[in-house]
Image: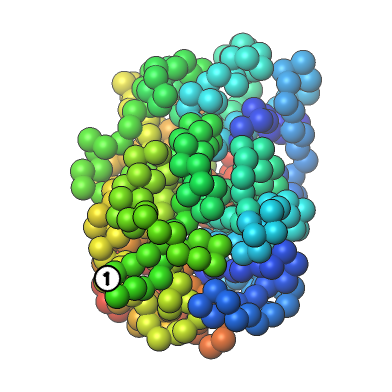
């Protein structure tokens, strides 16, 4: 039986690991290699590494940083941040990335999803969708602003139709808040699409991770909980198992 | 020497790292002109069957690999799309030719998995059937899978299966020809042991 995954997310500003709160306020958490080593020894299910400044600084996540990090990483590695071309993807895969997360380019040029999936296979392309909570539901959020006129669920459907292999749905309103994940969002998105969904945003305990894990999501992604508390991915696995959810 | 084939669409980075960790000598080649001193072949893969099949044909590796494997009996391990390429043909992106080592077709998994999502992505356990390549690996150990298509065999060969809606071929073997649908290079301890076994026992 396929296990549900528990995935630490590591954010970079190009050089250092950091953690954001609602995507704005930042804390520096030091060298990415140290962080990576820790997760490697913990045999985590998978790791997501995102350079959150790359897109706005008009560059792609540094492929040599990825090469350094991948040396420490014997687990599936998803890399994202500022990816704008097929060459960017090729470079990152050659340095040890397994999957590529795209966000801005997909919103600007949705055909890029088709192109990338045709060349690298759907399973390699993760489309990341950031949303904020509004009074009517959710708005898509990109590079610090709301994207008006794009309905979340139409966009999810389009992402799937164009051949993405996986969706990373991130509730920005809960980013770094550690007030609990958004079960409603995780559940509605994972019911709606027929590709794997990773939920991120606000998960504040292993039990809360397991709560989210009870819906149809394929994985939960976690940042603050692992950075700022004693909870580990292993604690989350145990919490999943206590809830009868298949975990490794 | 153990030789990794780089079709320029594959994730050779990950497999190299795993081999370095194991501490085995290897070479990476990206054109069949350099295809001598080959004792074992690893054909890794990320990508679509179509792109991989085209790369195989246009690079000249198609004939070179067939000669090594069929005439010189050099053992080969195909990984993920690399395993799928061992079949006669694949239907991803229109019917495309594979190396034809197995009488098999690579098809979309939707009629096997039912309601489950595709790709089949993540850790799933494999019934290892005490096959040599799984020596010292516990039955039902988890390996990492990422794929939307799977191998449909029309001949009776050694297989190890995983369950995702229905049985899916996780590993296929006939003599010196081996394929793994999962990524051993990403499957931590069990995956590294699988690679060691291929290198030392197969």
Which residue is drawn at the image coordinates 47% and 56% (left, top)?
A128
The answer to whether any part of residue A235 appears in the image is yes
Horizontal and vertical percent position of residue A124 = 50, 44
B85 shown above or below A239: above
Q: In the visual, does A102 lie left or right of B163? A: right
Sort mark 1 into few (<14), some (14-19) or many (20+) by Cα contacts within 10 Å: few
Residue B111: which quarter of the image? top left
Look at mark 1 in the image and give the residue it sits on.
Answer: A136
Please give the name of the residue rendered at 24% of the width and 57% of the height, measured from the top-left corner. Answer: A191
Residue A81's quadrant in the figure?
Answer: bottom right
- Say which of A237 and B142 sits in front: A237
Residue nearer the viewer, B23 or B89: B89
Instruction: Residue A237: give x, y in percent of width and height.
Output: 41, 74
Q: Residue at the spot x=62%, y=40% of the render?
A: A85
Image quadrant occupied by the N terminus of chain A: bottom left
Query: Left or right: where does residue B111 sit relative to residue B196?
Result: left
Tell me: A22 left or right of B110.
right
Q: Secondary structure at mark 1?
A: loop
Say if A111 sits above or below A228 in the image.
Answer: above
Q: Residue at x 37, y 77 (%)?
A: A181
Camera-side residue: A221 or A112? A112
Quadrant location of the C terminus of chain A in the rendered image: bottom left
Tell whether B142 sits left or right of A8: left
Residue B80 in view, yes or no = no
- x then y, percent, for residue A58: 69, 53
In the image, residue A50 sits, relative to residue B146, either above or below, namely below
Chain letter of disc 1 in the image: A
């Amino acid at each position: 039986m396929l296990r549900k995954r528990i995935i630490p997310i590591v954010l970079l500003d190009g050089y250092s690991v950091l953690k954001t709160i609602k995507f704005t306020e930042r804390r520096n958490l030091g060298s990415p290699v140290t962080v990576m080593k820790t997760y490697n020894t913990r045999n985590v299910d998978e790791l997501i590494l995102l350079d959150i400044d790359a897109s706005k600084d008009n560059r792609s996540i540094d492929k040599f940083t990825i090469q350094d990090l991948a040396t420490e990483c014997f687990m599936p590695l998803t890399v994202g941040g500022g990816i704008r071309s097929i060459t960017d993807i090729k470079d990152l895969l050659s340095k040890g990335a397994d999957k590529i997360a795209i966000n801005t380019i997909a919103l600007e040029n949705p055909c890029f999803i088709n192109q990338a999936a045709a060349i690298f296979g759907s399973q390699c392309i993760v489309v990341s969708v950031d949303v904020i909570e509004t009074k009517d539901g959710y708005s898509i959020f990109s590079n610090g602003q709301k994207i008006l006129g794009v309905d979340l669920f139409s966009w999810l459907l389009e992402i799937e139709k164009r051949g993405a292999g996986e969706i990373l749905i991130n509730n920005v309103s809960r980013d770094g808040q550690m007030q609990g994940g958004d079960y409603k969002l995780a559940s509605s998105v994972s019911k709606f699409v027929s590709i794997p969904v990773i939920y991120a945003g606000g998960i504040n305990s292993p039990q809360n991770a397991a709560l989210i894990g009870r819906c149809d999501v394929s994985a939960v992604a976690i940042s603050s909980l692992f950075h700022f508390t004693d909870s580990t991915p292993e604690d989350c696995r145990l919490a999943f198992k206590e809830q009868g959810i298949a975990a490794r | 020497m153990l030789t990794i084939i780089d079709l320029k669409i594959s994730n050779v980075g990950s497999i190299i790292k795993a081999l370095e960790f194991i501490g085995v000598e290897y070479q990476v080649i990206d054109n069949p002109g350099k295809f001598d001193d080959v004792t074992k072949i690893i054909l890794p893969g990320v990508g679509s069957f179509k792109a991989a099949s085209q790369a195989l044909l246009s690079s000249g590796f198609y004939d070179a690999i067939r000669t090594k494997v069929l005439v010189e009996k050099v053992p080969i391990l195909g990984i993920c799309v690399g395993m799928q390429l061992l079949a006669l043909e694949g239907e991803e992106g229109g019917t495309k030719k594979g190396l034809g080592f197995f009488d098999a077709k690579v098809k979309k998994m939707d009629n096997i998995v039912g309601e489950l999502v595709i790709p089949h992505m993540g850790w799933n356990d494999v019934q290892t059937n005490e096959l040599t390549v799984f020596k010292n690996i516990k039955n039902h150990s988890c390996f990492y899978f990422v794929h939307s298509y799977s191998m449909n065999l029309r001949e009776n060969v050694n297989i190890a299966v995983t369950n995702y809606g229905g049985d899916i071929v996780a590993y296929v073997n006939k003599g010196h020809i081996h394929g793994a649908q999962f990524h051993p290079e990403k499957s931590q301890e069990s995956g590294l042991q699988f690679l060691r076994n291929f290198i030392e026992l197969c």
